[in-house]
Image: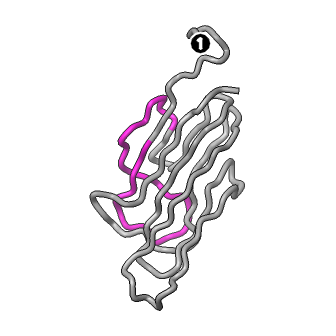
Amino acid sequence: FSKGSYRYAPMVTFFVAHTYEMKTTGPIKFNHLYVNYGASYAPGSGKFLIKYLGVYIFEYTIESSIPHLSGYLVVDGVDKLAFQSEDMDNGASGSRVVTGDAMLELNYGQYVWLRLTSGLIPAKFPPMTTFGGYLLYRT
């Protein structure tokens, strides 16, 4: 599609990582930016701003160093998808990792983020905890 076309899809993509210890619940603020085309991800808030009506893909990996890990993929304050990991070996393993993805049709001005409800994200570099997303196509 030409740049003037309604269907023209500008480059909107981000990939971020979490490198410090997080002991409290709440939004996961990813502090290491690898890619942020379209400047839609805000490290200060941990939120991704939807700048174009369309279908978006999100992927995440969350590591916890304690037996229980849970949280949500959130859109405008509404929990949309849950992630959870339970200890199945009575603490014998060192860490738990949860991965997930989502395909969502979103509107201009909405925000997307990950919220931790239980668990402890360890400080680690190179990082294990990551979050990424991109505009697949405009609608």
Q: Which residues are magenta?
A: 15-40
The image position of residue 60, as x and y in percent, is 50, 54
* The N terminus - image quarter: top right
Q: Quadrant of residue 33?
A: top left
Q: Residues within 10 Å of mark 1 (few under 14, many from 20)?
A: few
Q: Farthest left residue?
A: 125
**How many numbered marks are there?**
1
* The C terminus - image quarter: top right
The image position of residue 81, as x and y in percent, is 66, 58
- Asked which colour scheme the image uses, the reply is one colour
28 is within the stretch colored magenta: yes
Q: Farthest bottom residue?
A: 90
In the visual, does 51 lie left or right of 63?
right
- The residue shown at (54%, 74%) is 85
Residue 77, relative to residue 70: is it above or below?
Answer: above
Q: Quadrant of residue 26?
A: bottom right
Residue 12, relative to residue 59: is it above or below?
Answer: above
126 is within the stretch colored magenta: no
- Label 1 amino acid? Phe
Viewer-proximal residue, 97 or 16? Answer: 97
- The residue shown at (28%, 57%) is 126
Residue 25, relative to residue 125: is it above or below?
Answer: below
Look at mark 1 in the image and give the residue it sits on: 1
The image position of residue 131, as x and y in percent, is 47, 51
The image position of residue 102, as x and y in percent, is 61, 49
In the visual, does 89 lie left or right of 3?
left
The kind of secondary structure element at disc 1 is loop
- The residue shown at (39%, 88%) is 92
In the visual, does 95 lie left or right of 134?
left
Residue 78, relative to residue 13: is it above or below?
Answer: below
